[in-house]
């Protein structure tokens, strides 16, 4: 079946460090890929998305590139801030499946001043 | 402002009681979803609805029930049959269609604690 695998956290970084959160997927078709962010005690917010191979999603300094050859969608940010501390979820959605999302397990990011 | 509201934010229940969580959206979305999130874990789908008066079981529907009488509303009832109901519950909505690129919009969540 379809699945999303994320690196386990927590990921602890100092402010201004470079961030990478790995995400790989298994899908029977050609999915759209998403990164959602969840701040403490809140719901999920869409951070960025990519709908076809080689697309790059970007928002708030975060980027992720849809790599079909490696079935990956790694999240990166060049310089993290304390306010980026949150849980990050990678997810996929397939054509002809409506907008059903398959989520990864989430990765907690903690940024220290 | 358009969005999704969930109430209450915190809910306490005694064992053996049913409890209903509210979810309302004014985004004119056809599809609505309920997820359960346990500490340190991802989201698991409980129920979803593509259209009014229709809904489908997700991966962990046992012990839960829903209704979809209005497009804007998708309440979730946690019944006494749910053995471990303490969790964070998230409601979401989206456009429903064959394309995969439409995002889901999430509410702020309800934290349910069984005493």
Image (cartoon, rainbow, N blue to C red):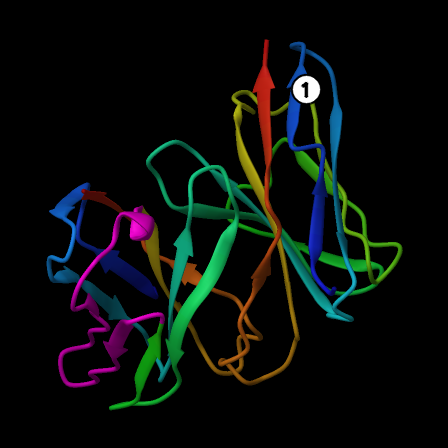
Q: In this figure, which residue is indicated by the disc labeled 1?
A: B80
- Classify 10 Å Cα crowding around label 1: few (below 14), some (14-19), many (20 and above): some
As helix, strand or loop, the secondary structure at mark 1 comes to: loop
Q: Which residue is outermost to the front?
A: A113
Coordinates of residue A81 in the picture (x, y in percent): 25, 54
Q: Nearer the viewer, residue B7 or B50?
A: B7
Tell me: B33 left or right of B87.
Answer: right
Coordinates of residue B3 in the picture (x, y in percent): 70, 60
Tell me: B113 left or right of A57.
Answer: right
- Residue A106 appearing in the image: no
Q: Is residue B64 above or below residue A64?
A: above
Q: Nearer the viewer, residue B81 or A41?
A: A41
Q: Residue at x 34, y 66 (%)?
A: A2
Q: Residue at x 11, y 57 (%)?
A: A17
The quadrant in which the N terminus of chain B is found is bottom right
Q: Residue at x 59, y 41 (%)?
A: B109
The quadrant in which the C terminus of chain B is found is top right
Q: Is residue B80 above or below residue B43?
A: above
Q: Chain of mark 1?
A: B
- Main secondary structure type of the part rendered in magenta: loop
Q: Give the image quarter of residue B14.
A: top right
Q: Give the image quarter of residue A73.
A: bottom left
Q: Which residues are magenta?
A: A60-85
Residue B41 in the magenta stretch? The answer is: no
What is the tally of numbered marks visible in this picture? 1
Q: Residue at x 74, y 25 (%)?
A: B19
Q: Is residue B90 above or below residue A61?
A: above
């Amino acid at each position: 079946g379809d699945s999303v695998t994320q690196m386990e956290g927590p990921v602890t970084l100092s402010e201004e460090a470079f961030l990478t959160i790995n995400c790989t997927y298994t899908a029977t078709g050609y999915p759209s890929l998403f990164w959602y962010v969840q701040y403490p005690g809140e719901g999920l917010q869409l951070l960025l998305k990519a709908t076809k191979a080689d697309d790059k999603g970007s928002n708030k300094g975060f980027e992720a590139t849809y790599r079909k050859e490696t079935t990956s969608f790694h999240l990166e940010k060049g310089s993290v801030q304390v306010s980026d501390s949150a849980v990050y979820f990678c997810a996929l959605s397939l054509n002809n499946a409506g907008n059903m999302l398959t989520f990864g397990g989430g990765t907690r990011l903690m940024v220290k001043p | 402002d358009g969005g999704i509201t969930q109430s209450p934010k915190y809910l306490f229940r005694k064992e053996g009681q049913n409890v209903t969580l509210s979810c309302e959206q004014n985004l004119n979305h056809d599809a609505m979803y309920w997820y359960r999130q346990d500490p340190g874990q991802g989201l698991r789908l409980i129920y979803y609805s593509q259209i009014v008066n229709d809904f489908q079981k997700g991966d962990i529907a046992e012990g839960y029930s829903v209704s979809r009488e209005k497009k804007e509303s998708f309440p979730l009832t946690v019944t006494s049959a749910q053995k471990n109901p303490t969790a964070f519950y998230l409601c979401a909505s989206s456009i429903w269609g064959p394309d995969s690129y439409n995002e889901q919009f999430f509410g702020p969540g309800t934290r349910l604690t069984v005493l």
